[in-house]
Image: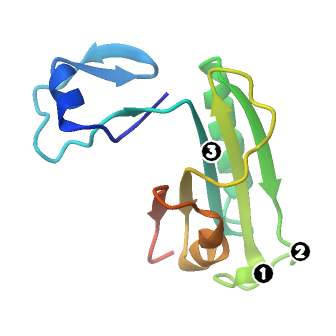
Amino acid sequence: MTSQVSSPAEQADEASEALVGGQRAPRSDHAGAGEKEIRRLDRVIIRFAGDSGDGMQLTGDRFTSETASFGNDLSTLPNFPAEIRAPAGTLPGVSSFQLHFADHDILTPGDAPDVLVAMNPAALKANIDDVPRGAEIIVNRTG
């Protein structure tokens, strides 16, 4: 598994190759200074969060299917709000789907996400306390 972070020395070592789906592939000639670094991770916990009805369960299900298709072991935790359809952008209406995956046995859906994908500010606010220092956060600010 890979994430987009590594040291400049690691970048130099891999200047002619890039990791794609756990396999080596030629690096693009268009790689520049703005290119993200690559870091290998033992396992990843990702949480998708947004308003109920925004498709977080579907997004999580599709991401889970793709993850499994690469032969990864996984565990999921769908989280539905108590409100049936709370007003958009409110904390009680936030729905999430957490996926813990790795290339070895996974026994739980995980505690804290390594990556939080928040579809709106309410989803960020509802989940930010679970995100450890150093985790990645992807937010749609206009959500």
Do the numbered discs 1 and 2 sit on residues whose CB atoms are within 8 Å? Answer: yes
Q: State whether residue 101 is above or below residue 120.
A: above
- Which amino acid type corresponds to the residue marked 1 in the rendered image? Pro
The residue tagged with tag 3: helix, strand or loop? strand
User: Looking at the image, is 81 positioned above or below residue 4?
Assistant: below
According to the picture, the residue beneath numbered tag 3 turns out to be 45
Image position, residue 74 (x, y; %): 72, 31
Relative to residue 140, is residue 24 drawn left or right? left
Between 111 and 96, which is closer to the camera in this rendering? 111
Q: CA distance from mark 3 to mark 2?
A: 24 Å
Q: How many marks?
A: 3
**Quarter where residue 102 is shown:** top right
Residue 35, x across and y down, in percent: 20, 42
| Residue at which label 2 appears | 82
| Mark 2 secondary-structure assignment | loop
Q: Identify whether 87 is placed above or below 141.
A: below
Q: CA distance from mark 1 to mark 2?
A: 7 Å
Taking 51 as reference, is 86 left or right? Answer: right
Residue count near mark 1 (Cα–Cα under 10 Å), binned few <14, some 14–19, many ≥20 = many
In the rendered image, which residue does mark 1 sit on?
92
Badge 3 amino acid = Ile
